[in-house]
Amino acid sequence: MSSLEIKNLHVSTGDKEIVKGVTLTINTGEIHAIMGPNGTGKSTMAKAIAGHPDYTITQGDVLIDGKSILEKESDERAREGIFLAFQYPSEIPGVSIANFLRAALQARMAEGEEIDASAYYKRLYQKMDLLKIDRKFTSRSVNEGFSGGEKKRSEILQMAMLEPKFALMDETDSGLDIDALKIVSEGVNSLRGPNLGVLLITHYQRLLSYIVPDHVHVMIDGRIVKTGDKSLALELESRGYDWVKNELQPA
Ligand code: ADP
Ligand code: MG
C-alpha cells in the first residue's frame, strides 16, 4: 500500500492565499471525493500537488510513502506516481494518441532504455479493450476537435497506460454531459483497485452515484470543513452548501 499525505497545505498564487491549511491522507485502494462551491481552491490544490508552476506552496508538505515530493519537478512527481487529469486538456495537433502515450511512457524510463514497440501496442490494446475504446481512436491527434466525451476517453486511456498510484481528477467545471460522465465513471471503476488512489474533485453529486467514494470532503474557502462517507454527498445534493457554512459560523 502507498499513501499520499497532504499536511497543512497552504497554496498561494501571486500574493493571494487560496488553499489555507488542508490535511488529508489518501491510501491506494481508496477514492476520496472533494466537493465544494466554485472558487474555493479545489483545482488550485490539485495543481499544486502535481507541481504546477503557477502555484506556490507556502506552508505544509505533500508526501508519498512518507517522503516529501515538494522539491521535485512535476515530471518527477509523475514518475513517483502522481497523475493529474486536466480540467481543460490541451490539443496537440499532428501527434497521435498512440505516439503521445508512447512518448509519455518513454519519458518515464531510464536513460538508454527503449520501449519495445510490440509490447507497447499489446498493452495499449489491452487497456483499450478494458476501457471499451475503439482502436481507430489511437490514430487521432491528441484532443484535436475532440468532443467532451472523447477528451475524457483520451484522459482515462492516458491514466490506464501510465498506471499512477494517485490520480487527481478535476471534473468540476468541465460540463460533463451524460456521455462524458459515463466514460469517466466506467473508466475509473474499471481502473479502481488496490494499487490506485483517487482524489476526485467534483461538484456533481451525480458523478458520485456512479463512482462511489469511500470518503467525501467538503472544501470551503481553502479549507476542508467537513468529512464524511458517501451519504454526505447526497446530503449536499439535497441541501446545498449553506448549511455547512452555517455550521461553521453559528449565529
Ligand atoms: P475551484 O476549483 O474550487 O473552483 P480554484 O482553485 O479554481 O477554485 O480557484 C480558487 C481561487 O483562486 C479563485 O478565486 C480563482 O480566481 C483564484 N485563482 C486560481 N488560479 C489562479 C491563478 N493562476 N491566478 C490568479 N488567481 C487564481
Ligand atoms: Mg476548479
Image (cartoon, grey):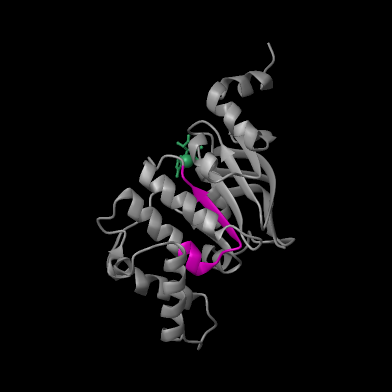
**Image-based side of 18 in relation to 158, left or right:** right
Name the residue at 59% across, 33% down: 233
User: Can I make out residue 6 in this image?
Assistant: no
**Image-based side of 80 in relation to 111, left or right:** right
Residue 31 counted in the magenta span: no
Towards the viewer: 220 or 209: 209
Rendering quarter of residue 11: top right
Q: Which range of residues does the magenta coloring cover?
A: 158-171
x and y percent of residue 189 in the render?
Answer: 54, 54
Extreme residue toward the right, this view = 66
User: How many numbered marks does the figure carry?
Assistant: 0
> Where does the N terminus fall, quadrant-wise?
bottom right
Name the residue at 55% across, 51% down: 48
User: Can I make out residue 81 in this image?
Assistant: yes
> Where does the C terminus fall, quadrant-wise?
top right
Towards the viewer: 203 or 222: 203
Towards the viewer: 241 or 188: 188
Name the residue at 61% across, 44% down: 213
Q: Where 138 sits versus 247, above or below?
A: below
x and y percent of residue 8 in the render?
Answer: 70, 44
Q: Where 181 sits versus 191, above or below?
A: above
Rendering quarter of residue 197: bottom right
Extreme residue toward the bottom, this view = 112
Name the residue at 55% across, 33% down: 36
x and y percent of residue 72 in the render?
Answer: 60, 64
x and y percent of residue 249 in the render?
Answer: 67, 18
Q: Where 162 sits versus 40, above or below?
A: below
Q: Where 96 sits versus 231, above or below?
A: below
